[in-house]
Every structure is written in C-alpha cells, then in structure tokens.
Amino acid sequence: MVARVMQSAVLIVLTSLTLTGCGRQVLKESSPNFDLLATGPAQKVLPTVRPGVSEAVDAAGGLETWKQCTRIEFGAVVKACARDGSFYLTQQDLVLCPWSDALQVTAHEPQADFVWQVVGGRYYLPQADPNLDVSPLGSERCDYAYAVLQIVTAPARMLEDGLVLTPRPAVVQIDGQWYLPIDAKHAEKDNSGAKARDKGGVEPHWTQSIFFQDQSRPLVDMIWCGDPDAKKFLIVRGYDYAKITVGGVKVPTKIEVFQSDSDANLGPRLALVDLKR
C-alpha cells in the first residue's frame, strides 16, 4: 500500500542523499504530496482484524471508522527535552495519513517554519537548512516523528501487511497498570532493510515493535520500537484519548516519547506533546 501510494505521491526522483541531524541518511528531495497520501486502505488487501487486535481497534473508534480516516491534523505544544534536564517549548502542526504510514511536522521556530516528514519509515527533509530547527530534538527529530506516528495511528499500524503479531502468554504490570505485550515483527522490512543498509540505502530501519495493550480499556497506549542493528530503541506513550474531530477516531491528546533499551525500559524523555483542542 505504502509503496503504491509513494510512487504517485513523490513528485521527482531522488536528487541527493545527505547526512542530517537525524543521525541517518535522509531523503532530500521534493516533498511528498500529502493530498495524494490521504487515502484509505486498499480494500482488497486489508487483512482481517486479528485475534487480540480487534479489541484495540474497537477501543480507538472501530475498524469502519478507521477505514474512513484518511487524514488527521492537529496543532500541538511540544516540550523538547535536553540531556541536561533543560527543555524547549515550541509549537508544531502535524498532518498524519494513517493508511499511507505518513506524517508531516511543521515546527514554528524563531527564524522560520521548519518542516520534515516520515513516510513509510523513510525520512524526508524538504528544506536545505536543518539548522532552522533549534530545538533540543536535533538528531532525534526524525525518530520523534516516527514515534508520534506510531502511537496516534496504532490501529492502522497493527493492520499493516507483512506484520507478524504474537501476543505473549502473560500480562505484565507497568506503573501499576496491567498490559498484554504483543510482539510485532516487520518481516518484509527486515530483508529489504538489511539489503538497503548494505548498499548505503534508506529503507525503513525500525524492524521490531511491541504493542502494549492496556487490559482495562483495552487501548494500545504504549509502543516500543527497536532497531537492533543500530542499537536504537524508543518508547512512546499515549494519554487522555479523545475524538479530536466530530465522528472521528480516538487518538491520544497527550504523548510522551522516551529513549529506551532492548528490554523496553524507560530512558530519558525526548518530548512531551500536548494537542491543541
């Protein structure tokens, strides 16, 4: 689905590769067209809701509602956290296309608006000067955007083609709350990503996830994401779920993004996101 939409959404071919503050190779080219990315799922390939997942989708608004959701837009106040304990407040506008696995962030910074995108796990930096981003996110901004995309569009992410989901046999307690961990393996991305990395390419690098399903609701309101090859790991948590548009899907109105480790322990907080409503 993402590959098909990307072929029609990207306006020109790749012109150059650049190393940016994201710490990884980022596509620097004409911006993908989010009007074209705002599409529903491909009905003929939409998988049946899997056991253990249907409850999470229902809790977030239901499959039929999500199938009609092609675009989610909201403004947010973002608290970007530095390693020394200081923080930086900024305002961002976010556009998400659930079924195209796409997010665009526009950060309103002092010098100018700064835009970056994550589409199908690939990072796009349409602007020439990454120094316009003065927030402490810096090298983590692409990973931050990926984490926000995962938690807001979790029902769509759990229904992706090629995703192997394996619920664990027992629940775990985290911060006093019981969760069912559901291991997710991006089988197709493992092979293509490994080949691309060998060739210096830019295939999606996150190959493992754990969806934590809250046993009291049962929303998936916490996700661990892993890139074992690069030894990078994230945890993203969602709070205060609500419908931000009339008849819309339920999304978290407060989001926290943390660094993590291979055992899904919380590390330093990267950002706190509060949606404007």
Image (cartoon, rainbow, N blue to C red):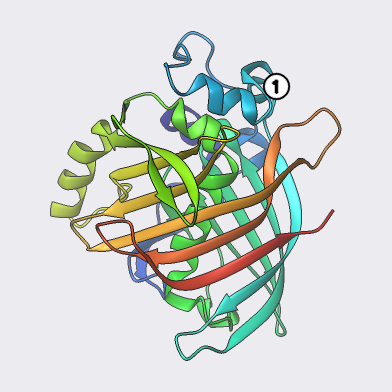
Quarter of the image for residue 259 reads bottom left
Q: Residue at x 41, y 31 (%)?
A: 3
Q: In the image as oriented, which residue stretches furthest toward the left? A: 198
Residue assigned mark 1: 65
Q: Position of residue 91 (x, y in %)?
A: 73, 70
Task: Classify 165 as above or below 13.
Answer: above
Quarter of the image for residue 255 reads bottom right
Residue nearer the viewer, 246 or 181: 181
Q: Position of residue 2 (x, y in %)?
A: 46, 32
Task: Classify 32 as above or below 158.
Answer: below
Q: Residue at x 34, y 71 (%)?
A: 23
Quarter of the image for residue 190 reads top left
Tell me which amino acid carries mark 1.
Thr
Q: Position of residue 127 (x, y in %)?
A: 56, 68
Tally of numbered tags: 1
Q: Residue at x 50, y 72 (%)?
A: 270
Residue nearer the viewer, 263 or 42: 263
Q: Position of residue 20 (x, y in %)?
A: 40, 73
Q: Is residue 32 visible?
A: no
Residue nearer the viewer, 13 or 127: 127
| Crowd around label 1: few <14 · some 14–19 · many ≥20 (10 Å) | some
Q: Is residue 241 left or right of residue 12?
A: right
Q: Is residue 105 left or right of residue 246?
A: left
Q: Is residue 264 left or right of residue 251?
A: left
Residue nearer the viewer, 179 or 126: 179
Secondary structure under badge 1?
Answer: helix
